[in-house]
């Protein structure tokens, strides 16, 4: 594992690396083989974050270069047994009729809760787009889509994506 840049609230190592060589080989291969990631460019530009907890590391890795919508993937790496390594998939709202996705634009991972959020901007002014929030199901370790917000019209009014209109929620629509 790369050198820790700090530690989380519980003292576990976490940090960010800017060299592809600091990312475990199985995680690098995941990105390049499965998602055609351009790691040499993206890791140097955006960094790859890691969060260690016990014998498991969570990696948040940028995949492709972009101005507003940088796709990231989230990988779980077990250094003692890399055969257990996996990337996580995220649900798409049922009404969109699209498959689940492993790449999330502008992915943010909260190590304290395991929550993943992502924002896809529809315009260069960050004033419209879609926001997705996923939470890990404790029993399965899979991510469940909790809510999807969307502001389809770009109107010049910026603000946090978390304030965009609700499009879908698991509580109201069912899962």
Image: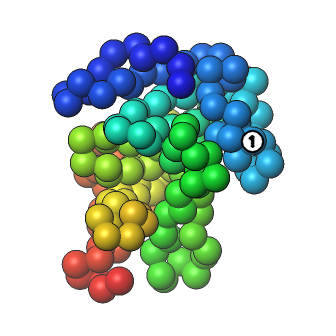
Residue identified by numbered label 1: 29
Count neighbours of disc 1 (C-alpha within 10 A) and say few if under 14, some if 14 to 19, many if 20 or more.
Answer: some
Task: Report the residue at 34% width, 61% height from top.
Answer: 136
The answer to whether residue 161 is above or below residue 53 is below
**Residue 51 image offset from top left, x and y in percent:** 40, 33
Q: At x 59% / y 51%, what residue is drawn?
A: 85
Give the vertical position of 145 relative to 9 (above or below).
below
Residue at the far front: name it. Answer: 80
Q: Is residue 144 visible?
A: no
Q: Is residue 130 visible?
A: yes
**How many labels, in total?**
1
> Which residue is painted at 45% across and 57% down in the image?
130
Q: Nearer the viewer, residue 66 or 137?
A: 137
User: Measuring 49% from the left and 63% from the top, which residue is drawn there?
Assistant: 90
Front residue of 102 and 173: 102
Which one is in front, 40 or 137? 137
* Local secondary structure at mark 1: helix
90 on left or right of 150: right
Q: Position of residue 140 (x, y in %)?
A: 38, 70
Q: In this picture, is 26 found above or below 133?
A: above
Coloured how?
rainbow
Residue occupying the far left of the picture: 9
- Residue 24: x and y in percent read 63, 31
Residue 50 at what x, y percent from top left? Answer: 46, 31
Name the image quarter holding the C terminus: bottom left
């Amino acid at each position: 594992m790369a050198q820790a840049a700090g530690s989380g609230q519980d003292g576990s190592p976490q940090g960010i690396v800017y060299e592809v060589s600091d990312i475990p080989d199985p995680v690098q291969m995941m990105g390049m083989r499965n998602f055609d990631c351009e790691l040499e460019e993206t890791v140097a530009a955006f960094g790859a974050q890691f969060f260690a907890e016990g014998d498991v590391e969570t990696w948040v890795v940028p995949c492709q270069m972009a101005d507003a919508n940088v796709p990231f993937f989230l990988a779980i790496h077990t250094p003692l047994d890399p055969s257990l390594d996996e990337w996580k998939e995220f649900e798409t709202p049922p009404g969109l009729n699209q498959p689940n996705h492993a790449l999330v634009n502008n992915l943010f991972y909260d190590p304290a809760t395991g929550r993943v959020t992502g924002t896809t901007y529809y315009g260069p002014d960050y004033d419209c787009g879609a926001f997705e929030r996923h939470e890990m199901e404790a029993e399965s370790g899979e991510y469940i889509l909790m809510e999807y917000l969307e502001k389809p019209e770009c109107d010049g009014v910026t603000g946090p994506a978390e304030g965009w209109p609700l499009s879908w929620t698991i509580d109201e629509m069912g899962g």
